[in-house]
Structures are given as C-alpha cells and as structure tokens.
Image (cartoon, rainbow, N blue to C red):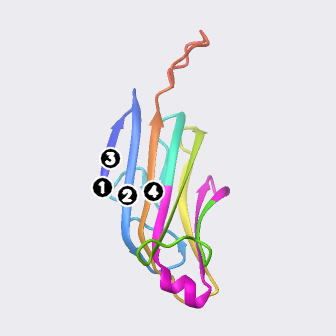
Amino acid sequence: MEIVLDKTTGFTFYEELKELTLSGDVDFNSKHGSVTNKKLTIPVYGIYKIDWGFSQNSLSTFYKDATSELSLYVNNYKSEITAVINKETKSYHAVKSTNKSITLLLREKDSLFLNAVNLNSENLLMNNVYLKIEKLEVEDKSGFGYDG
C-alpha cells in the first residue's frame, strides 16, 4: 500500500487485493483514514486520474460463459466506464486482464468505491483487483489563481 498525502500539492492512493471472491462493494481493508465503509473520501479539491482493474483465470469465462465486471462509483453514481472480462476478452497464458482509467474533477468529501459483479456464474474469483487515484497538478494559465 502506498499513500502520500500533502494538502497543498497532491494526493495519491493505491491499494490492491490479491483475490476477491465476493460480489458487491470492494473492501480493501484499508488502514487509510480517508476510507470508511468501503468508500474513499477525497480530501482535496482537484483533478484526479483514477485507474482500476483486475485479472482472472481464462478457463472460468471460456467454459462457463461468465462475465465479471468491476465498476467505479462516484458519490453513489455508477460511472459509464466499467472494467469487464468475458468470453471475448483476449487471454495471455490462460489469464485475462482488464483495466480502465478516467480523469475527473472531484471536490473535497466526494466519495469513490468499486463494485464487483459476476454474471452467469455462481462464483466470483477476481485476482489482483486494484484502485489507484492520483491528484494531477494543473498549471494555471487563466490568470484567475487556481492552484489545482
């Protein structure tokens, strides 16, 4: 786990689960003070790059026609971008992987979380589930004094 917090310049959050077997909101078991009830609270207003993804054994999706989804929620609203592994996802050495990235303007106290869903199968088994959030430094060229 890597956490860097500096209220004047930025914020970075990274957590990974080696294995996820339950559908629903992802609990990273974080010790970070900004994470409560499986949700990360944004501490500083600014523009953020958010990355998330997972990998999965390709046999599950091939034989069972299963689909696994990992969705980002911002303030309890589902993002239109979802990380998906299904029968059509390419496989490398019997492993399928997916990752997504989005850049958003977030305000202080906005909340984020991931939700895992497994379709057409009884068992969910996601590997290397991760969430990475970085506050981007933005250069002010407007003359209005925004410091990002």
Q: Secondary structure at mark 1?
A: loop
Badge 3 crowding class, 10 Å Cα cut-off, few under 14, some 14 to 19, many 20 or more, is few
Q: Which residues are magenta?
A: 52-81
Magenta stretch holds residue 79: yes
The spot of residue 77 in percent (x, y) is 67, 56
Specify the principal SS of the magenta part.
Answer: strand
Can you identify the residue that label 1 sits on?
1
What is the three-letter code of the residue carrying label 2? Glu
Work out whether residue 95 or residue 138 is closer to the camera in this orientation and state it.
Answer: 95
- How busy is the neighbourhood of tag 4: few (under 14 within 10 Å), some, or many (20 plus)? many
x and y, in percent, of residue 41 in the image: 49, 49
Above or below, 117 against 31 in this view is below
- Crowding at label 1, few (<14), some or many (≥20) Cα neighbours within 10 Å? few
Q: Earlier in the sequence, mark 1 or mark 2?
A: 1
SS type, badge 4: strand
CA gap between label 3 and label 1 equals 7 Å
Say which mark, if any, is on residue 3. Answer: 3
**Contact, CB < 8 Å: mark 1 with mark 2?**
yes
In contact (CB < 8 Å): disc 4 and disc 2: yes
Q: Are marks 3 and 1 in contact (CB under 8 Å)?
A: yes
**What residue is at 43 percent from the left and 78 percent from the top?**
94
Q: Could you say whether the residue bearing mark 2 is in a helix, strand or loop?
A: strand
The verdict on residue 30 being magenta is no
